Image: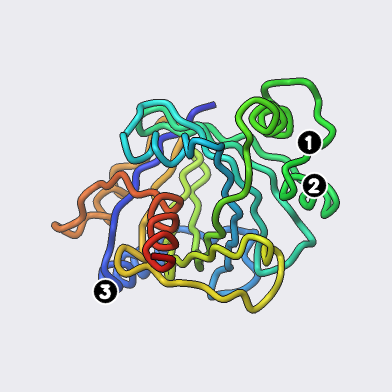
């Protein structure tokens, strides 16, 4: 299923104010380990032509992103994900993989799959074999998330978006990061078919503008800038 995903660049003041509003009416994500939220570290992949990056820069209506994701710097749960964007709607195929499978993918090797286009491992394997899919950048940030079950609404506040080009360090602690020069905070609003009007009203500040925000693009650009 495709879900609506709207993104907004925010100042820290806006993010703090909106988060306080959500705290008053929504429950935190049950997967959070504490009141401060949790950290996300993702390893993004791209092909030999950097097609994922170029499609994002060009604003191609339908495009994919390939990533491996962990939480709170732990390898206890490793998610393999392929995210397909169609306009402002998102479809995510996700599964849990082992550390051995993660390491194989990081080396450009295929892993066992279900021979199904619904299996992200199948999509990874096809891209590895046909396009030379390889890891490109580590993206990390802190997230606080709130949910509203009707409509499967999920509102997230992401801070301290940062990047590392040392892809071999993925999964390790104390990675050295380059912080974004700007746009290191983002509000994301995701839902299936509807979102209650009262939530939209609570998210209104008078200044928020929807953005084609891409953590992957911004972090790739940050790494390229730092290397040059």
Q: Position of residue 227 (x, y in %)?
A: 44, 66
Tell me the CA gap for discs 2 and 1.
Answer: 7 Å
The residue shown at (26%, 74%) is 13
Q: Secondary structure at mark 3?
A: helix
Vertical side of 65 occupied by 213: above or below? below
Q: In this rendered view, identify the residue nearer to me: 190 or 87.
A: 87
Q: Position of residue 201 (x, y in %)?
A: 24, 51
Which quadrant is home to the N terminus? top right
Q: Which residue is mark 2?
A: 104
Whether residue 50 is visible, yes or no, is: yes
Residue ranking furthest to the bottom: 174
Q: Which residue is mark 1?
A: 110
Label placed on residue 13: 3
Which quadrant is home to the C terminus? bottom left
Point out the tag, 2 or 1, that comes first from the N-terminus: 2
Tell me the CA gap for discs 3 and 1.
Answer: 45 Å
Q: Secondary structure at mark 2?
A: helix
């Amino acid at each position: 299923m495709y879900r609506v995903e709207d993104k907004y660049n925010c100042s820290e003041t806006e993010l703090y104010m909106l988060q306080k509003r959500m705290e008053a009416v929504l429950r935190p994500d049950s997967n959070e380990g504490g009141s401060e939220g949790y950290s996300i570290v993702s390893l993004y992949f791209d092909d030999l032509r950097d097609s994922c990056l170029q499609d994002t820069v060009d604003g191609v209506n339908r495009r994919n992103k390939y990533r491996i994701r962990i939480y709170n710097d732990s390898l206890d749960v490793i998610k393999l994900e392929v995210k397909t964007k169609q306009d402002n709607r998102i479809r995510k195929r996700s599964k849990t993989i082992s550390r051995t499978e993660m390491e194989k993918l990081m080396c450009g090797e295929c892993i066992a799959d279900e021979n199904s286009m619904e299996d992200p491992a199948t999509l990874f394997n096809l891209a590895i074999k046909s396009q030379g899919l390889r890891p490109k950048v580590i993206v990390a940030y802190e997230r606080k998330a709130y949910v509203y079950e009707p409509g499967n609404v999920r509102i997230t506040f992401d801070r301290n978006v940062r990047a590392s080009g040392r892809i071999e360090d993925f999964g390790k602690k104390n990675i050295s990061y380059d912080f974004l020069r700007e746009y290191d905070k983002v509000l994301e609003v995701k839902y299936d078919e509807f979102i209650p009007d009262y939530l939209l009203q609570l998210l209104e500040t008078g200044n928020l503008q929807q953005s084609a925000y891409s953590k992957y693009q911004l972090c790739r650009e940050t790494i390229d800038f730092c290397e040059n």
